[in-house]
Amino acid sequence: MSCRLVIDSSLLDWSADLPQEPPDEDVVCKCDARNVMNSVLRHDYHLWLSTDLYDEMCDQLYDQKKPEYKFRQWPRLWLQTMQERRRIENVQIPFENVLQGVQMCNEMVKDAHLIESALSSDGCVISRDEKILACWIGLCHKNPPAAIVTAHPKISSIVWADPQVQGEDVVWWLDAGAPEADAEAWKLNNQSQLEHGCQDYQTDKCVLDSGRSSGGST
Ligand SMILES: [Zn+2]
């Protein structure tokens, strides 16, 4: 298996146990997330995570002070198993892949480590957060092209799989060995725009002036 995957902590969050009598859609989310994660485990995929992204995962899973802690045993065990099998790699983000905040909205800035990790590995993200996917698709469809896409042209061809958007196809694709040809439609510039449109793309100037860190907290 050659495909190095970048996985967002949103997927691990959704795989957690649910409180009693959860809404139906939460049960669906949980099943989607676990199916994807089980497939990743079953097929010897490796995760490529930047230090930022890995720290974010650990913060969410191992912080005993958070009320969600007791529900997150399943994703903790999954992560532990991945670690024991040495399938979590630390991605060093080269300077040319660091996104400088240009034109991203606050959510995109917060999740920029996903794109940075993907640019620095095989360009393949799995997440479960339709809103952030919508933001990136929208940015890749901008005409004239957004400055950040001009500066990092590989962003447009990042394969972004989200079980909320592509359904069970994501698991079938992973089970099939993540064939590149089958993921053509999931490249950011090939995906159709989603209902949630990002209204908050910043102008180059205001982001450059404010810097990345100040835009990051939501
Ligand atoms: Zn946005």
Image (spheres, grey):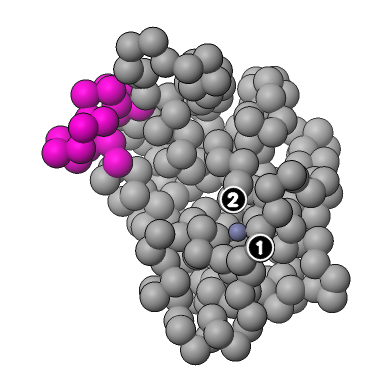
Image-quadrant location for residue 59: top left
- Residue at the disc numbered 1: 199
> For mark 2, does the 10 Å Cα neighbourhood hold few (<14), some (14 to 19), or many (20 or more) residues?
some
- Residue at the disc numbered 2: 132
| Label 1 residue near ligand 1, CB within 8 Å | yes
Left or right of residue 110: residue 51: left
Residue drawn at point x = 63 percent, y = 31 percent = 164
Give the mark, 1 or 2, whose residue is nearer the N terminus: 2
Residue drawn at point x = 35 percent, y = 43 percent = 57
Decide whether the magenta segment is chiefly helix, strand or loop.
Answer: helix
Tell me where residue 79 appears, x and y as whole percent.
Answer: 34, 31
State whether residue 161 is above or below residue 123.
Answer: above
- Counting labels gives 2
Q: Magenta stretch? A: 60-78
Left or right of residue 42: residue 54: left
Residue drawn at point x = 61 percent, y = 75 percent = 202
Image-quadrant location for residue 180: top right
Q: Nearer the viewer, residue 199 or 45?
A: 199
Of labels 1 and 2, the one closer to you: 1
Residue drawn at point x = 82 percent, y = 46 percent = 192
